[in-house]
Image (tube, rainbow, N blue to C red):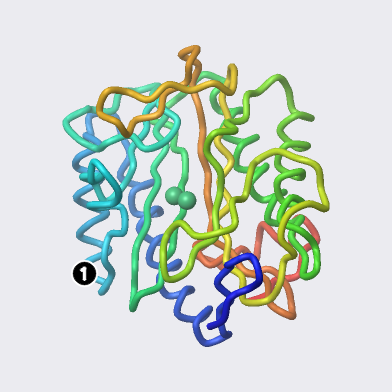
């Protein structure tokens, strides 16, 4: 491992392979949770499932105890107008809700971080479309990353795609981030901006990209629990995230179960795993 001149952690190929182990555990845990989402299940039950799956595969939940006040869960469970950092607990999901689940794990000292938004049964068409747009914007962002490009190429691709799809709000106070031996490391990866700015994308860099998009505005409010971020206007939100890296052969989405192979191919991007 070495560091770039902007304090970005640069991993060796062997260390990236270790990050894939952590990333795959996160990706598989999220797929387990996706299947468990249904009316009547509590966010606390989803949290317990995630913790069991991570620990039984030799991982450590990275969110648990994070920061101050210490985050109490293995997952962030953010329902409807909650955008990110919702605390799992006794809330029962109801038909028509939408839940964003963010999950992180550490394996052998290396972090993975990813998020999905899941519909609880049938949701209104505009919410379904919000989910589609947000997830596609994540993949457009990942697909825009190239060796020797810049971090804001990702940001620009996300903003451009979301903007082309309608009048959505993109959060600006929260961003993606570098990741590796810690969950949050330099550089920030904003979900908006002009291309060609920020640190150069080089081999050995690992980034978490995570668009947070609303059906209304971009402003948010922090609840009294000091974690849960809700939209300022009560509009519903979606959040998708993947951890990825660039190799000499292409893009490798470390938290996607298939490494990103299928979605990248659809966007004409070579798979780098
Ligand atoms: Mg996350
Ligand atoms: Mg993250």
| Extreme residue toward the top, this view | 233
Question: In which quadrant of the rendered view does residue 13 lie?
Answer: bottom right
The picture places residue 117, in percent across and down from the top left corner, at: 46, 39
Q: What quarter of the picture does the C terminus occupy?
A: bottom right
The picture places residue 81, in percent across and down from the top left corner, at: 43, 21
The residue located at (77%, 65%) in the rendering is: 146
| Extreme residue toward the front, this view | 5
The residue located at (46%, 53%) in the rendering is: 114
Residue 92's place in the image compared with 212, above or below, is above
Question: In which quadrant of the rendered view does residue 89 lie?
Answer: top left
Q: Which residue is mark 1?
A: 56
Residue 81 in view (yes/no):
no
The residue located at (70%, 71%) in the rendering is: 271
Q: Is residue 140 left or right of residue 194?
A: left
Q: Residues within 10 Å of mark 1 (few under 14, many from 20)?
A: few
The residue located at (23%, 35%) in the rendering is: 41
Q: Is mark 1 within 8 Å of ligand 1?
A: no
The picture places residue 219, in percent across and down from the top left corner, at: 54, 21
């Amino acid at each position: 491992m070495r560091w770039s001149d902007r304090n970005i952690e640069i991993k060796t190929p062997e260390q990236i392979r270790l990050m894939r182990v952590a990333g795959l555990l996160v990706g598989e845990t999220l797929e387990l949770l996706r299947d468990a989402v249904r009316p009547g299940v509590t966010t606390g039950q989803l949290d317990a499932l995630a913790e069991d799956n991570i620990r039984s595969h030799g991982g450590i939940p990275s969110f648990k105890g994070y920061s101050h006040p210490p985050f109490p869960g293995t997952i962030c469970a953010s329902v409807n107008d909650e955008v990110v950092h919702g605390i799992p607990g006794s809330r029962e999901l109801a038909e028509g809700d939408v839940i964003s689940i963010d999950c992180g794990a550490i394996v052998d000292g290396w972090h993975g971080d990813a998020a999905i938004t899941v519909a609880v049964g049938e949701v209104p068409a505009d919410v379904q479309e919000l989910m589609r747009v947000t997830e596609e914007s994540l993949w457009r962002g990942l697909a825009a990353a190239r060796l020797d490009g810049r971090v804001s190429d990702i940001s620009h691709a996300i903003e451009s795609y979301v903007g082309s799809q309608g009048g959505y709000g993109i959060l600006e106070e929260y961003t993606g981030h570098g990741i590796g031996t810690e969950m949050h490391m330099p550089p920030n990866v904003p979900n908006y901006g002009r291309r060609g700015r920020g640190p150069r994308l080089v081999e050995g860099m690992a980034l978490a990209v995570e668009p947070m998009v609303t059906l209304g505005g971009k402003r948010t409010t922090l609840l009294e629990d000091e974690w849960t971020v809700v939209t300022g206007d009560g509009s519903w939100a979606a959040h998708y995230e993947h951890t990825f890296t660039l190799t000499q052969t292409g893009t490798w989405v470390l938290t996607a179960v298939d490494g990103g192979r299928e979605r990248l191919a659809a966007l004409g991007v070579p798979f780098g795993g």
